Image (tube, rainbow, N blue to C red):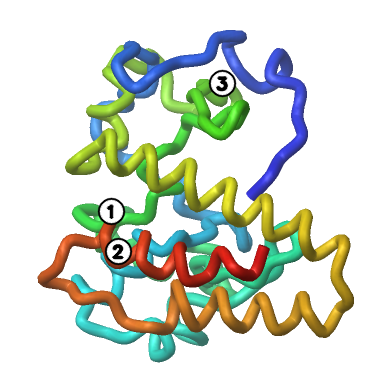
Amino acid sequence: MNRYIDLSEVSDGRLYGANDLVKAGCGDCAGCSACCESMADTIVLDPMDICLLTSCLGIPAAELLGRQLELGVVDGVVLPHIKMTDSTGRCPFLTQAGRCGIHAFRPGFCRLFPLGRFYENRGFRYFLQVHECSRPNRTKVRVRRWIDMPDFDRYEKFIADWHYFLRDLQESMTEKDPEWAKEACVRILNEFIFNPYGCEADFYPQFYERLKAAEDLL
């Protein structure tokens, strides 16, 4: 999701790399679940998120739609996001005790919070959103440890490649007719979301095989 913001208004004015220390540590969020509530349609899922959710829950993406997930338009492209509970606005994976029920395989958006990504030159750096988490006295933690993903360098490359593929696709949509854009959205959903991933196989080769096949859209 692209956001056009003034970093000086939302961050501490610094950009961080994966090995930098940042004040994001929140004591395991003990007694707090504020960031899991009233998030509307902002927790957009990428192919890695879908792979982890479907394999760990044992439920295909198509069956999760309408229950825990729904589709929405993100910068012109149709993508899945977490469907918040209508009555409370809580994440459907949040337990009654206010703990994440899928913490081990939670989406990248949740792993990142309260950090954000600043994209530039086909890559990105991180920034700390100073108004998003109300937890006082946060401690310093290394960015890669905070996000807590295996094969972190490969994960960062995937994040950048997926982001810029979508951005390039969005730019193409402005030059094409609406019917082309509609067909492109359907193909992206089928290629990256609904087509099951081999849960026992390495995710990244599967993703890049699909990415190569989809790049002819551009």
Badge 2 marks a residue whose secondary structure is loop
For mark 2, what is the residue?
A: 95
The relative height of residue 138 versus residue 134 in the rendered view (above or below) is above
**Residue 139 placement (x, y as % from top left):** 31, 14
Q: Which mark is residue 99?
A: 1
In this view of the protein, which residue sits in the foreground, 152 or 73? 152
Q: Quadrant of residue 72?
A: bottom right
- Asked whether, in this view, residue 171 is left or right of residue 205, the answer is right
Q: Position of residue 59 (x, y in %)?
A: 27, 85
**Mark 2: few, some, or many residues within 10 Å (few <14, many ≥20)?**
few
Question: Which amino acid type is marked by label 2?
Answer: Thr
Quadrant assignment, res 4:
top right
Who's the residue at 26% across and 60% down the image? 205
Dot 1 crowding, Cα within 10 Å, few <14, some 14–19, many 20+? some
The reply to whether residue 32 is in sight is: no
Residue 174 to residue 111: above or below: below
Q: The residue under label 1 is which amino acid type?
A: Arg
Q: Which residue is mark 3?
A: 130
User: Residue 8 at x, y = what percent?
Assistant: 71, 13
Label whose residue precedes the other's in the sequence (3 or 2): 2
In the displayed structure, 190 sits above or below 49; it is below
